[in-house]
Amino acid sequence: DQQVKQNSPSLSVQEGRISILNCDYTNSMFDYFLWYKKYPAEGPTFLISISSIKDKNEDGRFTVFLNKSAKHLSLHIVPSQPGDSAVYFCAASGQANAGGTSYGKLTFGQGTILTVHP
Amino acid sequence: DGGITQSPKYLFRKEGQNVTLSCEQNLNHDAMYWYRQDPGQGLRLIYYSQIVNDFQKGDIAEGYSVSREKKESFPLTVTSAQKNPTAFYLCASSIVQANVLTFGAGSRLTVL
């Protein structure tokens, strides 16, 4: 049962335009969401995150939007650059219990391959 | 430079053999994790450890074992009981009670 889904396996965008990557989740207990970027043969690197108490978080060219009622989040990259070409994973974390053991236990989507053409 | 070192980068194993993947971090992080990535799938949690000498099973722990004798080290053993061991294995670490993980470069295991 895939609790976090990225339904678009790939996305192709022209340099300078906006890239929009989407992610849907089913578990309403998720309260923290992250985006990771991964180049081939490397580990994922953290990009941006958002807590469920917010609906938007911005960091430079990257903005993450969260729609809790729709259980949907998206990552916007503006403007897109060729160096942004990578696999993007969204991930979610559940509500921490008293022991705090849900921290770091991330549920990942399948990833979306972004290609930005010069 | 602080980071996570995974070795070996590539590993081939015959069926029925155990293999141990190394993970070392010098970030002074208390928590460490092992994830597995298969083609077309997201990363799945195998084991995690919040503190030395303690670890818990993740979502797909069957056929794997770990140890956490030192803060810096969290080796993963893929045993012969793991039915589909061919995958890309990623080690990660974090400060305690944090969701942002730092990942290593990964180890690709192929069973022949």
Image (cartoon, rainbow, N blue to C red):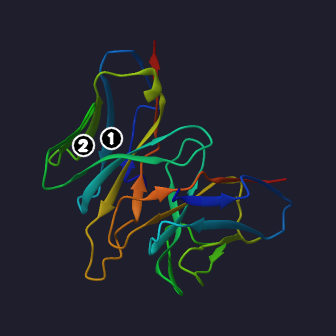
Instruction: Choose the circle earlier in sequence order: 1 or 2.
Output: 1
| Left or right position of A76 against A83 | left
Q: Residue at x 24, y 63 (%)?
A: A29
Q: Residue at x 40, y 65 (%)?
A: A105
Q: Label for residue A23?
A: 1
Q: Position of residue A43 (x, y in %)?
A: 54, 49
Mark 1 touches mark 2? (CB < 8 Å): yes
Q: Chain of mark 1?
A: A
Q: Position of residue B2 (x, y in %)?
A: 51, 59
Q: Position of residue A54 (x, y in %)?
A: 13, 50
The three-letter code of the residue at mark 1 reads Cys
The three-letter code of the residue at mark 2 reads His
User: For the residues marked 1 and 2, what is the alpha-carbon distance in whole angstroms?
Assistant: 6 Å
Examine the image and state in which quarter residue B34 appears.
Answer: bottom right
Q: Give the camera-side residue of A80 and A1.
A: A80
Q: Residue at x 71, y 54 (%)?
A: B86
Q: Chain of mark 2?
A: A
Q: Give the camera-side residue of B18 and A77.
A: A77
**Secondary element at image label 2:** strand
**Secondary element at image label 1:** strand
- Disc 2: which residue: A72
| Left or right position of A70 against B8 | left
In the displayed image of the protein, which residue is found farthest to the bottom? B53
With respect to residue A51, does A38 lie above or below?
Answer: above
Q: Label for residue B6?
A: none
With respect to residue B91, does A90 lie above or below?
Answer: above
Q: Which quarter shows the N terminus of chain A?
A: bottom left
| Left or right position of A101 against B47 | left
Q: Residue at x 46, y 40 (%)?
A: A111
